[in-house]
Amino acid sequence: MPDSEALLRVEHLSKFFPVKKHRLFEEQSYVHAVEDVSFSVNAGETLGIVGESGSGKSTLARTILALTPSTSGDVYYQGEKITDFKVGHAEQKRLRSQMQMIFQDPYASLNPKLKIGDAISEPMLANGQASSRAEAEKKTRELLEVVGLRPEVFDRYPHEFSGGQRQRIGIVRALAVNPKLMFCDESVSALDVSVQAQVLNLFNSLKNEFNLTYVFIGHDLSVVRYISDRILVMYLGKVMEITGYDQLFSEKTHPYTQALVSAIPEPSTAPRKNRIILEGDIPSAVNPPKGCRFCQRCFKAMPECSEVEPEMREVEPGHFVRCHLYDPKEANER
Amino acid sequence: MQKRKGFLYYFVRNRNGMIGLAGVLLIVLVGTIGPLFIPKPEGYTMDILLAPSSEHWLGTDNVGLDIFAEIVWGARTSLYVSILAMLIAGVIGIPLGLICGYTHGILADIIDALIDIFMTLPMLPLMIIMAAVMGTSITNVALILGIFSWPQLARVTKNQTLKIREQQYIEAASCLGISKGSILFKHVLINTSGPVFVNMTLVMASAVLTEASLSFLGLGDPTTWSWGTILKRAWSQNAVISNPNPWWWWLMPSLCVVIYVVCFNLLGTALNDCLNPKGRE
């Protein structure tokens, strides 16, 4: 899907982790955490990435941000190749400040021995968003107010705050370096439901205020669809579907997506007839199934599915699915 | 915002820690201020081998020098040696431990091997050889002690670093474009400080013990008083076995060494308990 407008473009990105060998001459095997992932993110949109635990969502984000080296594939930012951030020092600095991440666990992502103010000011000084301590402090206090925290927070330590407050501090820390693209890695899943809603609304309002583009990673489709314009569904390291928000409920979605959609809780007392419950767990990513990754748990599996891996196909404009159900010849026969 | 009870709350309520702290403060006070009021015991007088009295609090030795004065001057030596040894061990051990724990690769492996080698070496014989070669001065003794104590600090620092390296806030810091050096010597270091600090007090305790051993073996500085030197003089005059026995001569410096080591160990253990939330009972 080459797109010249795209802010971020990922092409055939893979990340394999070597498995520790137990015998001397054992063949080296790998965890296929992310395999052949391609997608693009346009400026100003929010791309949601959903999938079960272990489907490689977080690894994908970490590989794009060069927090872990990639195995193969390329990443382009504003048209420039930035795979593993193998670029000049100044360019690296620019990328580090323009692409930011909000982490999953607000209790683990703040250094317990650093004052909030120092934790936020340091990256600003390191990346040149502030030239002096005083300037960094002024900006920090302003940003703290933007996310609804009192500026006095500046001189306090992380353990004095609740999860929601800490997540806001994490957001301020990322915002402080003027990012354009923000990765939110399960950023609300560690929070209470009521706090989740607050933080999601904060994300939405910050998006307009700071012209942000989000890649929003989550395992909960009900949360992800609330904030996303487009949704990418991952399963066992592979992209199964890329779909617009409206097409999520169309007929032509991947069976896995159908299962995820049917699992969204509904505020209704009427009994639901069509909830799809998947059998078993996500298989091991060391020896992924031959053929379609999802074939073992798919409720629409055909003999072909465990033999041949399906290709990504555009079933509707802007809606890509990796499933044999939508093969052109199959459609003709039907 | 909840305010949790901090380190000090638990520390002032830790009885052993308070005893240790009081002892350490007393030793520091005696070692720093004492020599200003008490002249250095030198030469000889006629008051040989007097038992403790109001004039000579801890008695006198075989050349009539006041044991209390010798011990006060010895306290200064002990402090000097143990602080210098701790600093040397810290300056070598902490950075090496940080690098060894944080990086992967050949450098980390080399440091790891060095720590293992130094920890398996027979310390005392090597120290004796080094002291004999380098000459007997109190600074040399401190230098030798530092060189042999750093692996302990390096190992503690390394183990802490291994744990902290995997924390999300370290990943967050590198994602925010903070340099590797700053991550290592700021973000990691401040989180290792507790256990490392504790081990530094233990290094100080063992430094005094080893200094006393070296002085006792005649490898200390003959021109300065140390608790080991007093013991050596007593030993060479057969003070321990002679009859009637001038017990104050050998017992008092020995007690000082014991008190010093016990106080530093109490302090170190209490610090460890109070810095570690699980030990706060």
Image (tube, helix red, strand yellow):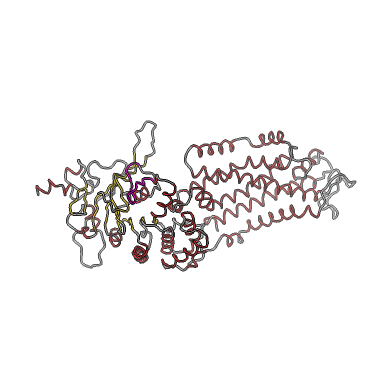
Question: Residue A180's quadrant in the figure?
Answer: bottom left
Residue drawn at (41%, 57%), measured in percent from left and top? A105
Residue drawn at (63%, 58%), measured in percent from left and top? B15
Q: Is residue B244 visible?
A: yes
Residue drawn at (69%, 55%), measured in percent from left and top? B23
For residue B228, side relative to residue A177 (left or right): right
For residue A79, side relative to residue B26 (left or right): left
A186 or A87, which is in the foreground? Answer: A87
Hey, which residue is sitting farthest right in the picture? B46
Query: Residue B125's x, y, as percent?
Result: 67, 34
A288 or A197, which is in the foreground? Answer: A197
Tally of marks: 0
Question: Residue A221's quadrant in the figure?
Answer: bottom left
Hey, which residue is sitting farthest top in the picture? A25
Q: Give the range drawn in magenta.
A: A71-84
Query: Residue B126's x, y, as percent?
Result: 66, 34
Residue drawn at (51%, 39%), measured in percent from left and top? B108
Q: Can residue A277 be seen in this view?
A: no
In this rendering, is residue A146 above or below B45?
A: below
In this rendering, is residue A136 above or below B187?
A: below
Query: Residue B252's x, y, as percent?
Result: 77, 48
Query: Residue B104's x, y, as percent?
Result: 47, 41
The reply to whether the magenta stretch includes residue B199 is no
The reply to whether the magenta stretch includes residue A82 is yes
A67 or B119, which is in the foreground? Answer: A67
